[in-house]
Image (cartoon, helix red, strand yellow):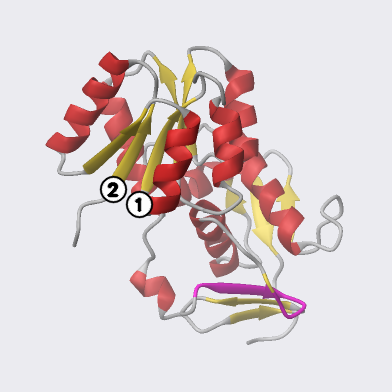
Amino acid sequence: MRPAKILVVDDEPHLVKLVRSNLEAQRYKVLTAMDGASALAIVEKEGVDLVILDIMLPGMDGFEVLQKIREFSSVPVIMLTAKDQDVDVVRGLRSGADDYVKKPFSVHELLARVEAVLRRATLDEEVQTRPPFVCDDFVMDFERRRVTVRGKDIKLGPTEYKLLSQLVQNAGRVMLHTDLLRKVWGPEYGNETEYLRVYVSYLRNKIEDDPANPKYILTEHGVGYMFKQPTSSN
């Protein structure tokens, strides 16, 4: 298996050097960019497996870069944000980020987040062998990693797909917030309920006729989420 290719985007040379050396020590292949335009060119040309993207960049900021990446790629993105800037965290998640790390961060924390995000992007071979799931006009084909609603293909990023897969595999059963976070994001997670709110919103906007009144992804307030149980066996 080839080493994962990671793009680090930051305009602080010492931070880039630190992150690069630690990622390379873990056998990752590392590319770097100091600004948004260079980052976009690398993502488009190199086909990277993960982007570590700082918010504070010269010219085009990290949010703009992420928005442009999402126009053509679902590559996982970890945002770097200033400490205690929760508004940046929420904005980043709503812009399509997969995770975030607050500065200043420990190398151990960053490496754990990188590993978790790359793990989420990997398909589960056991899940791939499951038969297609059908509920009304919703179909999830695990083998083809394909979701259709009313016959229309739904494009999902890695985290969106993994969250939907967990809900569908447990259709008719309420999944607790903590269980979903740990199964989808990884064992390092458990309290980041904002992640769930944002990604459930993404999914509802893509598969529901009326996202404000969902019929597939249902909320059990204060507890978790549940995917609708099919009315007949499939």
- Tell me if mark 1 has few (under 14), some (14-19) or many (20+) residues whose alpha carbon lies within 10 angstroms of its own: few
Secondary structure under the numbered disc 2 in the rendered image: strand
Question: Residue at coordinates 56% horizontally, 65% vertically from top-left?
Answer: 170
Q: In this view, does 136 lie to the left or right of 35?
A: right
Front-most of residues 200 and 59: 59
* Number of the front mark, 1 or 2: 1
Residue 116, image x and y in percent?
35, 44
Question: Residue at coordinates 60% horizontally, 22% vertically from top-left?
Answer: 88
Mark found first going from the N terminus, 1 or 2: 2
Q: Mark 1 points at which residue?
A: 46
Pointer 1 and pointer 2: residues touching (CB < 8 Å)? yes
Q: Name the residue under label 2.
A: 5
The alpha-carbon separation of the residues under discs 1 and 2 comes to: 9 Å
Please indicate, yes or no, whether residue 78 appears anywhere in the rendered image. Answer: no
Q: Quadrant of the C terminus?
A: bottom right
The span shown in magenta is 145-152
Q: Which mark is residue 86?
A: none
Residue 47, image x and y in percent?
38, 54
Q: In this view, does 30 lie above or below 136?
A: above
Check if residue 177 falls in the magenta segment: no
Q: In this view, does 205 lie to the left or right of 9?
A: right
Q: Is the magenta stretch mostly helix, strand or loop?
A: strand
- Number of marks present in the image shown: 2
Q: Is residue 28 above or below residue 25?
A: below
Please indicate, yes or no, whether residue 139 appears anywhere in the rendered image. Answer: yes
Secondary structure under the numbered disc 1 in the rendered image: helix
